[in-house]
Image (cartoon, rainbow, N blue to C red):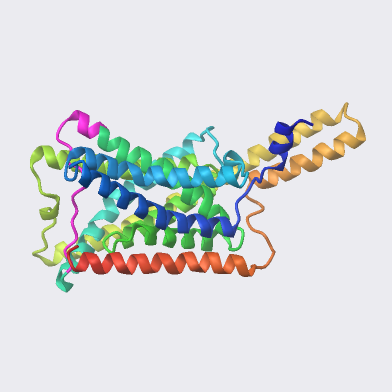
Amino acid sequence: MDEKEFKAQSMRNCFNLKDSGLNFIYSLIFPFLVSFVLAIIFFIFKLDGTQFEKVVNMAFVPGTFFLIYFLYCRKNNINMIYASQVRLKINWLKALTVVVIAVTAVFLVSPMISLIDHLFTFVGYNPKNDLPYEMTNVLTFIIGIITMAVLPAICEELLFRGLILKGVQTKFGPHVSILISAAMFTLLHGSLQQTVYQFILGTLLGYAMYYGKSIIYPILLHFINNLVVVITSFIYTLKGIDPNQVSIYTTLWDYVSPIMWFVIAGCIIIGLIYVLQYLDKLQTSDELKAAVKELAEEAKNTPDEVKLTKKGKNKEIIASESNIIDSETTGWTKEEKIIFFGSIGLSIFFWITNTLMQFLGF
């Protein structure tokens, strides 16, 4: 066995809770440090306030997330493809279900988020709904799609659903893990305005990962969500509409209708998650049948020793592919507790700090 084969066999094929906690800490600290360095560079070269600065500021955060994910996996000899379930083969019914979930969330949940933003104004908080980058032509629109839809979808999902969620699942059940990772995803954004929607989105992304069994599905959901926002902003800009003045609340219906749409959206989305679960069961059943058939064919002319070895390996693979093994049964180590709860505490501190700064107008 040469060195390359030995390294491949010694690679880890899954993440753990320590990985989740450490990468969450890195995702909180490093983007802040990079933004500070960039701010100094832009100031020195008098680029602050320019379109170039805005594009770089939008691109560096997801780029930093990807570097954190990539370098951590390389340093710790983790098989990124297997551990993060990077599978390019798509079940088109699952993909369609995910797209409908994304569109439903954007259009039917958004009125409720706008209402919450309006209610914030009564306590002196005036959140802004416009994007940090103004798109006035086709070129700026394409740049906006890349920096605000493509990059965040890929980079944030690899880090959060591909690594953090998978690590949390080793200590918690799948549904609790999804909620915990959604809360971490929300805290990372550090914005009171985005709290409700980011938690909902993070939960949907978690279920897309769990029932999709591939990082492709949360990436697709995240991309569609952000793409709709980018397109809407572009249309508003072309028509001269101020997104901060779109929602006007003058009648009782203006307050009731967002709640109604939110309830309808909830019913539709829950139904679609069950559809995704059903499609996953069908796919898992088909994969199991195919594996059993393949084993039966191979068993005809296979020696008993090799037969048992192959059977054991295939059972392990099938169990992993089907998410039958979701978590470890081992207890928490002191190191895991310190790192994980420390990362949560740090994120809460950042969230409170950012919220106070937003209230004070900074």
Residue 198 seen in render: yes
Residue 23 left/right relative to 361: right
Callout count: 0
Q: Position of residue 175 (x, y in %)?
A: 52, 60
User: Which residue is at the far bottom?
Assistant: 123
Residue 342 lies, with reference to residue 236, above or below; the image says below
Q: Position of residue 282 (x, y in %)?
A: 59, 42
Q: Position of residue 261 (x, y in %)?
A: 27, 57
Residue 280 left/right relative to 50: right
Is residue 265 inside the magenta stretch? no
The quadrant in which residue 182 appears is bottom left
- The image quadrant where one finds the C terminus is bottom left
User: Which residue is at the far right?
Assistant: 304
Residue 23 lies, with reference to residue 234, above or below; the image says below
Q: Tell me the magenta residue range.
A: 125-142
- Seen at 66% across and 52% down, the residue is 324
Is residue 127 inside the magenta stretch? yes
- Seen at 16% across and 45% down, the residue is 49
User: Which residue is at the far front?
Assistant: 44
Residue 53 left/right relative to 156: left
The quadrant in which residue 213 appears is top right
Of residues 67 and 320, the one drawn nearer to the viewer in this rendering? 67
Residue 208 seen in render: no
Of residues 201 and 131, the one drawn nearer to the viewer in this rendering? 131
Residue 204 lies, with reference to residue 252, above or below; the image says above
Per the picture, the main secondary structure of the magenta-coloured stretch is loop
Q: Position of residue 32 (x, y in %)?
A: 35, 55
- Seen at 25% across and 69% down, the residue is 356
- The image quadrant where one finds the N terminus is top right
